[in-house]
Image: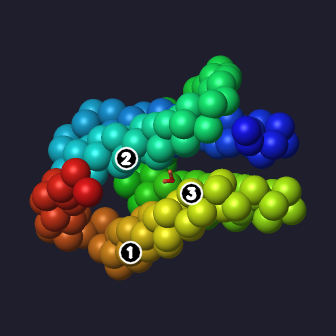
Amino acid sequence: MIPKQMLDAINEQINAELYSAYMYLSMASYFEEKNFQGFAHWMEVQAHEEVEHAMKFYKYVNDRGERVILKPIEGPPTEWESPLAAFQAAYQHEQKVTSLINNLVKISRELDDYATEAMLDWFVTEQVEEEANASEIVEKLSMIRDNSNGMLMMDRTLGQRGEH
Ligand code: FEO
């Protein structure tokens, strides 16, 4: 059994993780169109990761004998002013996801739901990495600005991102 308030919040989080996948896929397609294949690849890998995050919650809810209730997923933006603007949006989004995860931890503590609190540990650590990855790219793109050599180099580097 998962307390109802906790279960509802986890179901909301599944929606948020799937929205993240939508958003990163939308960014991937934006980069494809601009011929930044490396940036697009990075975003596709990120989209896969977000589906994995959703699946971790999905599996947890099922393992505890509860039902996952899927809600409609909002459509993400489709345009950004520049590659830098897209990564800034990604970074801001990850900061928001971190606060959502922190809120889940808070609820689990208030309800003495120790199993959920333990499960959330992985996400607390993961969010540190998620924010660090996006923030590092924002910083580099801010330095590069419109330098085309720098952009091509960055595109090559991000194109080498592995699945994890
Ligand atoms: Fe699932 Fe990027 O947080």
- Find out whether the residues at labels 2 and 3 contact each other: C-beta distance under 8 Å: no
x, y percentage for residue 5? Answer: 84, 42
Q: Amino acid at mark 1?
A: Glu
Left or right of 87, for residue 114: right
Mark 2, ligand 1, within 8 Å: the answer is yes
Question: Gap in Å between the C-alphas at discs 2 and 3?
Answer: 17 Å
Left or right of 74, for residue 146: left
- Find out whether the residues at labels 2 and 1 contact each other: C-beta distance under 8 Å: no
**Can residue 74 be seen in the rendering of this structure?**
no
x, y percentage for residue 36? Answer: 22, 47
100 or 93, which is in the foreground? 100
Q: Is residue 158 above or below residue 76?
A: below
Residue sitting at 34 percent across and 75 percent down?
140
Nearer-N-terminus badge (2/3) = 2
Residue sitting at 22 percent across and 51 percent down?
163
Q: Amino acid at mark 2?
A: Glu
x, y percentage for residue 38? Answer: 19, 51
Q: Which mark is residue 49?
A: 2
Looking at the rendered image, the quarter that the C terminus falls into is bottom left
x, y percentage for residue 29? Answer: 33, 33
Residue sitting at 18 percent across and 55 percent down?
162
Q: Amino acid at mark 3?
A: Met
Q: Which residue is mark 1?
A: 136
Q: Which residue is mark 3?
A: 119
Nearer-N-terminus badge (3/1) = 3
